[in-house]
Amino acid sequence: MGGKSFFIDTSICTACRGCQVACKQWHNLPAEKTKNRGTYENPADLSFVTYKLVRFSEVVVNGKFKWLFFPEQCRHCLEAPCLETADDPKAILKDPATGAIIFTAQTKNLDTQEIIDACPYNIPRAAKDGTLAKCDMCIDRVENGLLPACVLTCPTGAMSFGDREEMLALAKKRAAVVKGARLLDAADARVIYLVTEKPSLYHKFAVASNTAFDISRAVALKRLFKPLTSMTAHL
């Protein structure tokens, strides 16, 4: 399996949110009006104009208080349920060179909720007209030999990007030396996270939701048999 991948080492993420700002700057996305919610996490969630969000979690583990940080973005699944669910080949694309899953303006013609429900990580967000958006792997930068904006900006080296096999090797090497480390969904996604605590403590969608995979499979099967159903109706 070729293409590109991210490796995000949350054990050295300081939640500076440089990646979050860089993403907005590169994609020319506006800031969002927010309010104090008693957390440093800001804004409250991903949106049509926020592709990257550093999650903040205050937890107590073995009697000790911890801050856990999780830079969330589209995982660019190897077998993407959103792509399988879409019934318009021009709406959601898979870049053959990188494996990036790209949403286009044609997503406004899809069943918006169906695509959102198909994502095992709850990533896509919609505009008022139904157009969907998410991280695009900074495909324009990558195609020109540049790093994604978030990776280039990260001051601690928590984010790495490159050929998939190299990122997998880097992730496994790092996991071998970080106490309590585990890699999340490394076999299924192009964004490989290293965490040191139970994934659900970072975010409820830190690992894939099987429900979404089941939904996308059901939709795919429905489409597969739809032509047969239509043919039968005309006999």
Image (cartoon, rainbow, N blue to C red):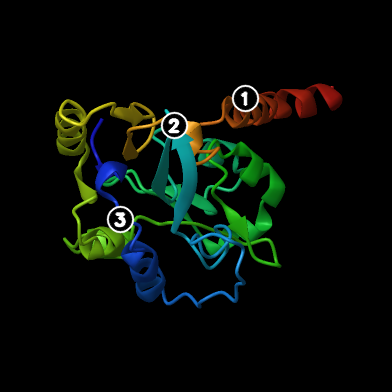
Q: Position of residue 148 (x, y in %)?
A: 27, 60
Write the residue at 40% across / 45% down. Answer: 68
What's the amino acid at mark 1?
A: Asp
Q: Amino acid at mark 2?
A: Gly
Mark 2 → mark 1, Cα distance in angstroms: 37 Å
Please identify the quadrant where the C terminus is shown: top right
* Quadrant of image for the N terminus: top left
Number of residues whose C-alpha sits closer than 10 Å to that of mark 3, classed few (under 14), some (14–19) or many (20 or more): some
User: Mark 1 sits on what residue?
Assistant: 214
Q: Is residue 100 visible?
A: yes
Amino acid at circle 3? Thr
Does residue 153 sit above or below 124 in this rendering?
below
> On screen, 39 above or below 84?
below
For the residue pair 208 and 57, the one nearer the viewer reads as: 57
* Nearer-the-camera pick, 135 or 228: 135
Q: Quadrant of residue 214?
A: top right
Return the residue nearer the eye: 59 or 201.
59
Q: Position of residue 142 (x, y in %)?
A: 24, 59
Q: Position of residue 167 (x, y in %)?
A: 19, 38
Q: Which mark is residue 63?
A: 2
Q: Is residue 5 left or right of residue 214?
A: left
Q: Is residue 89 left or right of residue 100?
A: right
Label 3 or label 2, whichever comes before in sequence order: 3
Residue 129 located left or right of residue 172: right
Task: Name which quarter of the figure residue 96 lies in.
Answer: top left
Which disc, if any, is residue 14? 3
Image point (57%, 44%), residue name = 122
